[in-house]
Image (tube, grey):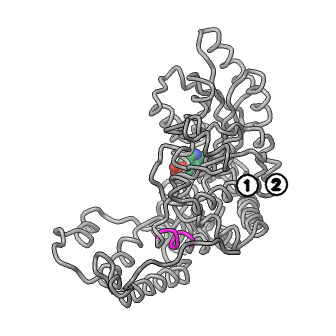
Amino acid sequence: MTLDRPGAHVADPSAYEADTLGMSVEEMRRLGHKIVDLVIERHIARNAEPAILTGVPADLMAVLGGPLPEDPMDPDASIDLLTEVALTHQQHGDHPRYFARVPGPSSFAGILGEWLGTGFNTISSSWGGGSGPATIEMVSIRWLSQMIGLPEQTEGVLVSGGSIANLTAFSVARSELGPGVAYLTDQTHSSLPRDLREMGCGTSDIHYVAVDEALRMSMPALRAAIAKDRAAGRKPLMVVATAGSTNTGAADPLNAIADICQKEGLWMHVDGAYGGPSAVTAQGRAYLQGLERADSVVLDPHKWFFQPYDVGACLVTRPGALERCFAMSPEYLKDVQATTGAVNFGNRSLELTRRSRAIKLWLSIRTYGAKRFRAAVQRGIDNAEYAEAYLRSKPDVWEIVSPAQIGCVCFSLKDAEHNTHGERAKAVADSGFACVSSTSLHGRSVLRLCTINPLTTRSDIERTLDMLAEGIGAP
Ligand SMILES: *Cc1c(COP(=O)(O)O)cnc(C)c1O
């Protein structure tokens, strides 16, 4: 179906042949195709290229810097310099052996959506100025919420990533319930306390709750913390639960937290920036039981929802709460929204002029379908379980410290060699073959694999673990 739109009004199209900065149609086409080809070639060659490459500041500056170009330079040479130097010196989050931190296994349909949106200089700020992109964002948020099992009335906004999405949710919580204390743990991603500090929370407003053996928020400790703050005359505001910690994939007990929030009148926030998308699978849904009871949920589609950087989602299950917090002219908005169902996304976060991050999401969900997303997420969960089984098959070498939990497994060399974890991880990264993290759990050094790239093979996992075991830098 197509909707009616006005016809073209240009009297003399040839007058507009060159764009404002002087590139002919032929040149646009030639360079555009060149870039498409470069990206495709990179995808074909990617698995044999280094998973990560880090440069030396002076070397990179020498090649990429130089005096301000007053006169035009050859775009082909500049594009080549970008692809050969600047864009190779990165962590390649979509490389099948990039297991560090949280990978970004972006899908090609997502890339196409990103290109198209940029090419049409897409804006998603107001309904009047961007009703098409706004609809795409509303639909994407609806689909995303449905896929992870959030209630029908869920609303949301797409921002740059988890850090800003969490900040957005915290602002909404405060706007709905007033200022107060936030409860989190030492497994909470470090960008969240930073968000709270930047909102003006002091140390007494950020209450760290103890974790249990499995690094999940302890419920007795949470109840005690709330009671202690009330006794001291402070107002508890919200519990910040983590649905898949970056360290181990551990999820706080969401149902128990929802019960406490309900009883105490607190906002329930869930940071699912890493693990939230696991809820598209039956296994992940069971693991994150209670997620659907949250007041706000954050996801990072640029991690486990196969989108190129950047896109984070802030989802809020209380209708109107985002606008009550962020609308700049709420009086005007009441009319528009109540009568037409139009959304002004510039009224749902601190971003006013904003590109559409929904186009890539919409295009990739339609291109692949929900079933393939579920299968791709499940594959990441299975791969961590395979890694755990492989490590357990070599009990003389390895010990599991935190078992596979939605795509993440932490392990350690047998006692004497703990101190070499960091060196071994670095040797593997320096070789370019793979990239893994070392972190610390209960004060103990561990190695960690995050296996959410659906392209990762069992052989990729085995070879990476063998290299770590041998402590060498070449496969
Ligand atoms: C990555 C991550 C964040 C931060 O998200 P950005 O997209 O890097 O801003 C927050 N919480 C968790 C659990 C994460 O994994």
Find out whether residue 115 is within the magenta segment.
Answer: yes
Nearer-N-terminus badge (2/1): 1
Find out whether residue 55 is within the magenta segment.
Answer: no
User: Along the line of sight, which residue is nearer the eye, 127 or 364?
Assistant: 127
Q: Which residues are magenta?
A: 113-118
Relative to residue 101, is residue 55 drawn left or right?
left
Task: Look at mark 1 in the image and give the residue it sits on.
Answer: 278
Q: Position of residue 278 (x, y in %)?
A: 73, 55
The residue at the point 49 percent across, 37 percent down is 195
Residue type at the position of mark 1: Ser
User: Along the line of sight, which residue is nearer the eye, 453 or 310?
Assistant: 310
Can residue 418 be seen here? The reply is no
Q: How many angstroms separate mark 2 from mark 1 (CA)?
A: 8 Å
Q: Position of residue 312 (x, y in %)?
A: 57, 53
User: Along the line of sight, which residue is nearer the eye, 74 or 223?
Assistant: 74
Quarter of the C terminus within the rendering:
bottom right
Task: Look at mark 2 in the image and give the residue it sits on.
Answer: 283
Number of residues whose C-alpha sits closer than 10 Å to that of mark 2, classed few (under 14), some (14–19) or many (20 or more): few
Residue type at the position of mark 2: Gln
| Location of residue 212 (image quadrant) | top right
Classify mark 1: helix, strand or loop. Answer: helix
Relative to residue 211, is residue 309 drawn left or right?
left
User: Along the line of sight, which residue is nearer the eye, 262 or 469?
Assistant: 262
What is the number of callouts on the image? Answer: 2
Q: CB atoms at circles 2 and 1 under 8 Å apart?
A: yes
The residue at the point 73 percent across, 27 percent down is 261
The residue at the point 55 percent across, 50 percent down is 345
The residue at the point 47 percent across, 55 percent down is 354
Secondary structure, magenta segment, majority class: helix
Relative to residue 47, is residue 218 drawn left or right?
right
Q: Position of residue 30 (x, y in %)?
A: 40, 89
| Location of residue 66 (image quadrant) | bottom left
